[in-house]
Image: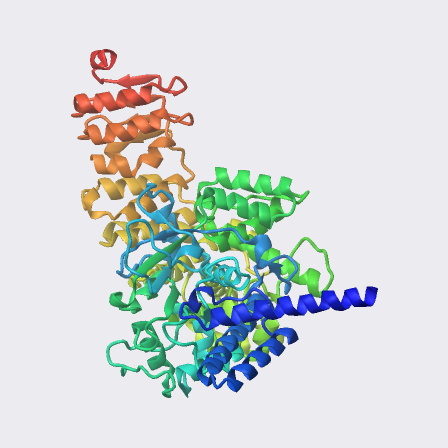
Amino acid sequence: MVSCMNVFVLEEKIITFVKNELKRFKRMLSPDYQENFESKEEAKSEAREAALKMALHFLRNMEQQDLADKLQENELEVVCQTELKRNLKNKYQRVFEGIPKQGSSELLEKIYTEVYITEGGSGKVNEEHEVKQIESRYKRPAGQETSIRCSDIFKLLPGQDKPIRSVVTKGVAGIGKTVSVQKFILDWAEGKENQDIHFIFPLPFRELNLMREKQLSLMDLLHHFFTEIKQLTFPSQGKCKVLFIFDGLDECRLQLDFQTNESLTDVTKVTSLDVLLTNVIKGNLLPSALLWITSRPAAANQIPPECVDRVTEVQGFNDPQKEEYFKKRISDQNLASRVVSYIKISRSLHIMCHIPVFCWIAATVLGLILGSSRGGQIPKTLTEMYTYFLIFQTKQRRLKFENVHDLDPQWNQEVILGLGKLAYEQLEKGNLIFYEEDLKESGIDVREAAVCSGICSQIFREESGFYQGKVFCFVHLSVQEYLAALYVFLMMAIERKDKISRHQTHGTFIQHWKQTWSWWSQTPMITLHKSAVDKALEHEDGRFDLFLRFLLGLSLESNQTLLHGLLQRGQNEMDNEETISYIKEKIRDVPSSERVINLFHCLHELNDHSLVEEVQHFLSAGTLSGAELSPAQWSALVFVLLTSEQKLDVFDLKKYIRSDEAFLRLQPVVEESHEAQLNSCGLTERSCTALACILSKPSSKLKNVDLSDNSLGDIGVHKLCSGLENPNNALETLSHVLLDELYSL
């Protein structure tokens, strides 16, 4: 009886399964099948294969060859899609994010923090240094941009009706572009988002570069990277949606000549990789395919504007996202809260933490200092932060390779010199990623590079691509710039002290560079500083801006003390005074506001206490007006003022530029002051709105405000009253405003 029941249940299950499969086959043969293309079940199960064979057998016996072929093709696409999703999930579900256990990884879902992405952006080249781009965004007024979720970049926003085929996503190095791509792919592979897309093909430029000499067709390229689809001739155009993701345009070493490259429409025609990519981007090859390109800002304009339907920009973390990141990154929640609290009161760190990679560096350094019983000096400048970071990584190396828990780092000078040499030479070439040929050109043996990446895996990495080849890179552009500056400073110190004989055990490396860079030994430090300042000013793209800030910062005895054992102490303090004087001369002579602003940052790294006066002199000298400064330049000046060591108790607008524009741009500085001298500055009702906003904040520090001899008007006075309604504001005196008018209102 039981046996009969089992047979009956089995029969019912088989019949139900076959019926469901027949329904699925029917859907696959329907004209609108592309709307339901995805399969959440295991497409290659033996039962499903058996059902397919049965259906094909009977269709062909019924002389329905066309239907049989269509069913077989559609089923093959489902199988390929399922296999592709499985493989992409395996590749993208983990992330290597410089975590303490070097060489290990974390699940992306566990540590992922959404970054702030906006739609829009000009197509012009942004030539300011990327760190300053982050600084300029920090005080950007809200509401000027439209935010968009990473998973929605191909979806229309309210009021839009034109389909979006191609998207360019811009963002500075380390801002989160690649991780955003990784999350987009993972969500698709796991069936969470964008299931209307049938195939996603990630093709990072750092791996495409390895094939730049090859001749191949588009199908050859796809079959090379994605073996799962080799059985397909190609997903039928118009029937299924395909997305190509080209990550890291700034790392591309192909010419990408959109003007003269031949036009190509055949996916099977063999040509150069350069021609293939330009035709895919222009829409000649697979015009229905979606396209997503990520790039650092300066390289994004390589793509012709007519080939781009949407531009998005990764802005990094907003304030809540920063806190979320630190709480996920630091397992000890008490320590995480302490780190967040410190960053909130350190303006420069708070601004820089918009960059996810800088958040990681800050979490590493501050977690070590605040979590240590010994404590330590909290870094206040970029140079201090990156110096602490290098120290921490050196300690980790000793712990990993020597099992030594020594609190003081033991420097491997050869490794630091090797990394620094590579960093400097590639910085001059504008390279952020390097291949074996780049290492050889720099005189670095590939095996030595592998050793460097093993010892300093969170500074310099050897990556095996998802698909092929080895790629070397520093964890972030700013780390590369720091090591380049450290290398120059270290070589100068070695040459000046004539210590070469003590380093014979390091082989021919230092001897070679003694000959190559012998001019360093013949010049005093001030000459090196002047040369570096001039070099930075010559490069309008800002390539050496951060390098210069680090180089000057390393000349401070406080930073040299941190690097004891690596750098020789004894730097002449007069060199710094002379350097400061030289920088101030350049501030007065250089016509470019952007170049001048970086020189202000340099004074900050040198702890120059006349920094605020220099900014005031720069603005009040009459050589420029507020209209000549871009919003980014104003924001950078605000950053300099806010991060200076000088107290900003009294804000006197007359020391800057007397205008509404200057007051509005310097509003963040006013907010940090106790007294605002705004008299005789030509202010109008425009400034009253901003001042009322400051006064209405519970955190307002303003106690005294002088607005005499300005044309505020009735409307301006009325607006000012709204700011005085807050009973908790700290204002004690408001000088020379028509008080009768205030009371009457």
Q: Is residue 648 above or below residue 576?
A: above
| Relative height, residue 213 to residue 485 (above, below) | below
Tell whether 404 sits left or right of 378. Answer: right
The reply to whether residue 107 is in sight is yes
Q: Residue at x 25, y 66 (%)?
A: 306
Q: Position of residue 91 (x, y in %)?
A: 57, 68
Across and down, in percent, residue 652 comes to 28, 30
Residue at the image position 56 percent from the left and 64 percent from the top: 40
Which of 529/550 is in front? 550
Asked which colour scheme the image uses, the reply is rainbow
What residue do we see at 20% from left, 30% from top?
Answer: 683
Farthest right residue in view: 1
- Residue 610 image-quadrant placement: top left
Q: Which residue is at the front of the view, 98 or 108? A: 108
Could you tell me if residue 441 is visible in this image? no
On the rendered structure, is 634 left or right of 184?
Answer: left
Residue 647 versus residue 377 in the image, above or below = above
Pinpoint residue 625: horizontal percent, then vertical percent: 19, 43
Front-most of residues 144 and 283: 283
Question: Which quarter of the figure is the C terminus placed in?
Answer: top left
In terms of depth relative to the viewer, which is nearer, 576 or 586?
586
Tell how many labels. 0
Q: Quadrant of the N terminus?
A: bottom right
What is the x, y in percent for residue 744? 22, 11
Q: In the drawing, does residue 90 fall left or right of residue 146?
A: right
Residue positioned 61% across, 55% down in the render: 392
Above or below, 542 against 143 in this view is below
